[in-house]
Image (cartoon, rainbow, N blue to C red):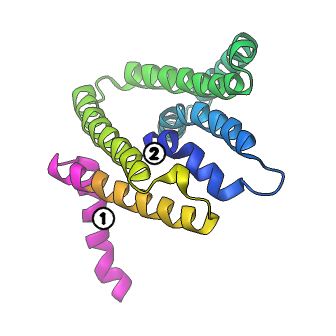
Amino acid sequence: MAGLIVLSEPIIQVLLQRGEFTAEAASETAYALICYSTGLWAFVGTRIVASTFYSLQDMKTPVKIAALSILTNIVFSLLLMGPLRHGGLALANALGSAVNFSLLFYFLRKRLGKLDGRNIVRSFIRAGAASAAMAAAALLGLRAFGWSEIASRVDRAGVLIAVIAASAALFLALAAVMKSEELGYLISMRKRKGPDTAK
């Protein structure tokens, strides 16, 4: 999410800005991408929590909450599309997803009891800190390469790939230093799959 917000315009410029797709069009598209990106955490979280309800043979709760989130999306779209234009529609979608996830999590916690909330918060703080550092590094990387002065689309693509790779490496390094449980889990899964893949 942090990477998409910070690198939204460079990504759109490299992928789409040519011919009739002008710099202004790239900027407007990046604006919408930023607004959509703010809801990524909710999009992902909703899929996980909704799947838990399905595993509990509860189909009604996710459907009811999804209907409410759609209504929330419509209301926020009407409220925000005036002052924020197309960005308001994208942001309304993100807000609707946030409502969806929040309600699903609330009712799941109410049904199952404790969900190790402290550990989730600690994980969120670690991920947030690493993401903030990664986003700052990406911005500094673009400035160091003089992004605004690069004219060639090929050169821009090379710089963008280098910045993304370096920023991702920094994120992983910080996650390792902060002993991210998620990173440790992924590494252990990879190690377990190694021998099976070889066979």
Q: Is residue 169 left or right of residue 100?
A: left
Is residue 13 magenta-colored? Answer: no
Q: Residue at x 22, y 27 (%)?
A: 118
Magenta residues span 173-199
SS for tag 1? helix
- Would you say the magenta stretch is mainly helix, strand or loop? helix
**How many neighbours does mark 2 have within 10 angstroms: few (below 14), some (14-19), or many (20 or more)?**
some
Q: Quadrant of residue 95?
A: top right
- Depth check, mark 1 against mark 2: the one in front is 2
Q: Which residue is mark 2?
A: 3
Front residue of 88 and 46: 88
Front residue of 100 and 167: 167
Q: Residue at x 20, y 54 (%)?
A: 176
Q: Which residue is mark 1?
A: 189
**Which amino acid type is marked by label 1?**
Met
Is residue 174 magenta-colored? Answer: yes
Residue 136: x percent and y percent?
35, 41
Front residue of 150 and 33: 150
